[in-house]
Every structure is written in C-alpha cells, then in structure tokens.
Image (tube, rainbow, N blue to C red):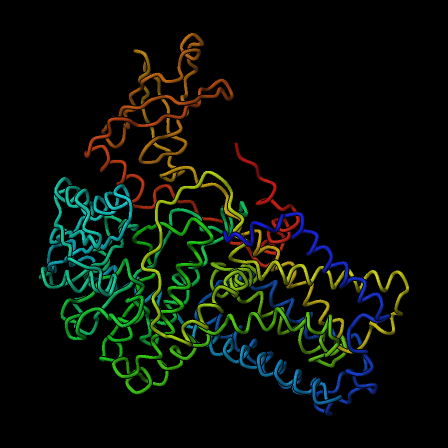
Amino acid sequence: MSSSSKLISPFAKAFLVASIIFSLFAFYLSLERPTIIPLESTVPNVLRTLPDFLALPQDEVIHWLPTVSVLGICVVLRWIPSTNLTRLVVRSILAVLTIRYLVWRQTTLNFFDGLSLTFSVVYLLFEAISMLASLLFVFQSTWTTDKLRHKQADKYEQDVNKGAYLPSVDVFVPTYKEPEYIVRRTVIGCQAMKYPNKTIYILDDTRRPHIKELARELGCKYITRPDNQHAKAGNLNNALKYTSGELITIMDADFVPFKNFLNRTVGFFQNPKFDLIQTPQFFYNPDYQARNLGLEHMLPNDLENFFGYMQPSRDTANSVICCGTSYVVRRSTIEAIGGYYTRCCVEDYQTSLRILTNGGRLIYLNEILSMGESTRTFADFIDQRLRWLQGNLQVYYCGDDLPIWTKLNWIQKTYVAIQLYYCFNPVFRMFFLIVPLITLYIGVLPIVATVNEYIYYALPFTILNIISFSWACDYRLSFLWDEVYNTTFCFPALQRLWLVLLNPFAKASTATRKGVKAETKNYNFHINWQLLVILVFSLFGISIHLVGMFSGLWSAEKVEFQGKQIMLFWIVYNTVIIATSILSGIDQPVRRQEDRFPLQKACKVYIDGHVYDGYTSNLSESGAFLVVKVPIDKNIINNIINQSAVIEFNEDDFTVEAQVIRYRIKKKYLHIAVNFKNVSLMQNRCLVEMLYCNLNWWKQRKKPGFTDSFLALMTATLTLRPVRNSYK
C-alpha cells in the first residue's frame, strides 16, 4: 500500500462514498422525473404499427397461446429422454421461434432521433449476433456419438483383455510445483492400471530432488530438463526425446486414472484412422461456486456440460478438443506435426487443431475413466480460465502454422467460429448488463414495444430456450447457473481480452495451484469489484424509481412507456444474477489437505485391547470417520481421545494404524474420527486405489430442472449464506 493511501482514513473513504450516493439521490429527486433526459424526448409519442404479417391477434387471450403451448412442451420434456432424435425435434421448434423473434425484433427500433436510433441499432446488432451464435450452437450440439463410442469401446476392449492387442504405452505425468502427495497419488493410480505394457514417467519441470526420490521410491521413470521453455508443451516435447512407446497417455499430476483407463481406450488404435482419443475430466471435489454457496449436492461443475455433452457433439464433425489430460495419442501423430504446439500459452486445444489441419482424426469416449482436482478458490478459477481464454484466442494469430481457415472443412470451421465467439462472449455479457442501466438512468430506450408483443413473440422463445438448455444436456448444466458463471467471468475476461488484443503473446500464468488450503474466508472484491459497482447502481436506480413513484414526485405516466417495463425486468434479473455471482466468489475456508469421500467400508477397530465391528462413514488418504456398531464400554469412552487404534479393512485385506482425535455418541453407537499414522507405501497404495481408482464412492447428484435451479439461486442469494457463515 502506498504512503498516500495510508493518509486517507477508512472513515473518510466511507464518507466520500456516502456523499456521492447522497448527491446522486438529491440530483434525481430534483429532476422531477425518473431519468436524466426527459422521456418525451427519447420515446415516440405515437404508437407503432406492426406489419400485417406480424400484427397481434385481436383477442388478447390468443396472445398467450404460443407461450402456453411452449409451456406444455416443457412440461412433457421432463418425461422425454434427451436423444439425438428428440433433440432434433425440440431444437427445430426452437429455431423457428428464434427466427420468429428476430423478425419481430426488427420492428422494435427506436426511430425518435439519431441518439435513440444508434443506441437501438447497436443493441439489436449485439442481440442478433448472440442469438445467431446460439442458434448455430444448437444445431452443432444436437447429434452425439455416445452410443457408437460405447459399443466400439466394448468391442476393442476384448482384444486388449485377451492380449491380442497390447501396444507399448508411455504414461506421462507432467508436474510443475504440485505438492509431493498429489504427484504420489497420481503415479500410484497410473501404476494401478491393469494394462501390462506400460511405462510411467514423472516429467518434473521444477527439478526437485524430492520428486526424483519419489520416482525412485515408487519405481517409475524420472525426466527433467534444465529450463522451463514453452511450459507444459516444452516439458512434453522434451520427454518425447527420451521415450519410445507406440502410444502416449497424458495424466496431469492432479488426475488419477481408473484401473481400466487404458483397457477402455487403447483398443481404439487398432483402427489406423484414429489418432487421439479424449475422455472426460471428472472432479472429485466440488468447484468453488458449489462449495461457497453450499450447493454441492445439486450444482454441477461448470465443465460437466462441456465434457458430458459438447465434446460428444463435436465428435460427430471430427472437431473434438484435446483437453490436456486423460487422453491417449499415437506417438507417430505427435511426431508428424513436429511435437506439441508451443506458440500459445496452453498446448492442448492448439495441438488438437494442429492434428486436424494435418488431416488427423480425434475421437471422444464419453466415459468417466479418471478423476482430478477442481479449482478450490475463486482466484484460481479465474486465473485458470483466463489462461485458457488467452490460449484459445492466440490460435487466431497463428494462421501461418495453424491454417484452420484453409485446411479444415466447412463444418469444422463453424466450430472454430463458435469458439471465437465464446472468446468475445464477455463483451456481449457486459453490454447486456449495462444497457438496462443506461435506460434506467439516461432514458434512451433501445426497444420500443408493448408488453403484449413480448408475450406473443419473446416469451415463447425465452421459455423454450431456457428449459430445453438443461434438458438437452441431460441436466448437466442449468441455464441460470451458466448465466452466473458467465457473469462472474465477464470483467476479468474483458481485461485479458484487451491485453491479448494489444499483445497476443503476452506472458500468462503457467499452471493452476493445487492442494490449496485457507484458514479464513476471502471476499475477493479486488477481482469482482465491477460487479459490485453495477449491483449498487442497479439497487440505487430501482430504489429511486420506486421512491419517486410512491412519494408522488413524478406521476406514473412519466414512468410508463413502451419498452420501459421490459428494461426494468432485465435490471431485476441482472441484479439477482450479479448478487449470486458476487456471493459465489466469497471463498469459504479450505482446511483439509485431502478430501474425504462418502465411502462405506466394513472394518474392525482395535482399541485398547478390544475389537469392535464398524464401517467407515467417510474416508481419505490421511484419516476416516468410523461408526462402531456395537456400543462401547463407557470406561473406555472417557479415555478414548488420543488413543492409538488399528483399523483393519476386511474386504481389502490391509490394516493401518490410527489415532483417535474426536468422538461423539449417536443413537447409542460410537462415532469416532481418526488420523492415520505410520502409513507405509503399500498402505498408501491401497488407500489411493480404494478412493481414486474407480467410482465406488460416487453418488449421482440431483439433476436440477429450471424450477430447482431458480429456487436454489434465490435461496443462495436471499439467505446470504457465504457472508453469514462463521468459522472458529
């Protein structure tokens, strides 16, 4: 903090802010109207006349007919599975409603004066581009290859299991500053894979002696290099020089493969046309948003939709994106393109484009075959996504050696085009957040239309778009929660976009932090302060309007005009989304080094010479919470804290020493929390395999529809849970 800033007391800063708010309040009350510019100066004083083919029916009841019909479709969708055929039907209806809406929107321009017309045309242009991009995505994501790839995996796996096809596989574990226990976990998981013809390599890009010793202890290979040139891409390219396996598997240091990972994927390479097979990234811990809002039981990770729905759709057009981990690739394919792509700050999407422009074939197997660590803090989430954004945008500056516009077919180009739109989506998000406020404060209206027109043309499209969004992806993501994610990311992304436009290859962060711990809450207002400003202006503007109307300072006639109600609705909507975004960015403490999973394992508990039957309620690599079925002698309970114990896992045939750290009695049974101690390598392997090498603890989360998502969003916003929670 600079010396000048220290001279200003917090009281003075608060007084300055309060003075500005009071001055704005007094200014608006002195206007005797709800906007700076008089409404009669910006809004046509005559009613619009719609073309004959867009004229509303005379009977106002019929105005609700399209909306009621769409609501009927949405209700039925809850019982109709999302398949290629049903998605095609529903999205064809959505396309008709979208075009119908856009045709009507051309008639809603404000022609009163030059300022109003310019503002209105720009708003329509932004909306049209956004909706046409959405329409393109709708058809890109209608058809998936899920069933085809599952059948192929079943067929090819048989040859691998029988030993008829066992090519050599080099498993690369690239690491950069990850804690040793995370690297250890990944290597143990890689060694547990059932595939026999594999070699595991730790690619240490920080030249740490203890990681080299870890490789020796675990019995795997160790490769390093003298510098960190080209980050992960350079690390992988360096490893290519010292290895020779026919296939290469990349498993990031924070991911653990299942035992059948290679058995389910390697067989595909019997087909000489396949160059790379990508599998989903699945996360064993909730992302920052779900954890901060207390919605881990229902809120999906924001990448679940991409891996579970978008990637299988891209597979239909040979446009699968390599995602950096949990994939298998031919060595000859990587060598044919000159190694992993190094010009961008990330290598995965760029390398897959290099393969595609070289005539390669990437496929996607939509089966969860590995687990990894999701970002635990809001700051890490933003940092990770900004790096991805910068890398994705850099692609369009590499036309000399990434000829995407000349080498790809026209269908593949549409996927590249939609990816470019997503890079600039923060610009559209910011525009739609600010425009309603401009109308609220200034009085310049971008849309002139009646509420009945919105009911007839806009509401049917809006409802079907929101409901079918969740249904089509099998409720992997909700429209409302997607809005929250995009709003959260908006302003940090705008800053990075500006940086990339000025200097496309500016330095970016190299890796996402893993194993993060925090003892206290972090509000992160330095990251999302722009959202706070918009929230304040929204609440202030709404309050001013309500105070002015109910106090009689200006009449209702001065507030009500064509289109104003719609802008007010969007301000309220944006306010809720922004408030939820801010709350989701308030990080709650992360105090455990290892996650605990709801894995129930039968066990025997040895304490002070007594043996008790029990089971684990939850389990981690470093401890467990046990339920002892048989009531324990009270004389033992009084002295149980810090007692040594031995836990014997019946089904897995191993024991581990432990220490009791706390207990409680519930329903006459003893519940004890223990920390493991003196854990040997063999015991560590058993624990990792139990916890990470399959999905035996995982429970299917709820699949929230629109109503569930809306209620969860409102509850999270109104209860202020991230703010109210207190921690000792």
What residue is drawn where x is 55% and y is 70%? 429
Residue 300, position as x, y percentages in the image:
47, 54
Closer to the camera, 149 or 533? 533
Asked if residue 589 is positioned above or below residue 633 in the image, the reply reads below
Residue extending farthest to the top is 635
Closer to the camera, 617 or 677? 677
In which image quadrant can residue 181 be found? top left
Residue 556, position as x, y percentages in the image:
87, 70
Is residue 562 shown left or right of residue 194? Answer: right
Residue 348, position as x, y percentages in the image:
29, 66
Asked if residue 518 is positioned above or below residue 574 in the image, the reply reads above
Is residue 549 shown left or right of residue 15? Answer: right
Closer to the camera, 587 or 195? 587
Asked if residue 65 is positioned above or below residue 74 in the image, the reply reads below
Is residue 282 shown left or right of residue 570? Answer: left
In which image quadrant can residue 431 be found? bottom right
Residue 352, position as x, y percentages in the image:
28, 71
What residue is drawn where x is 15% and y is 57%? 225
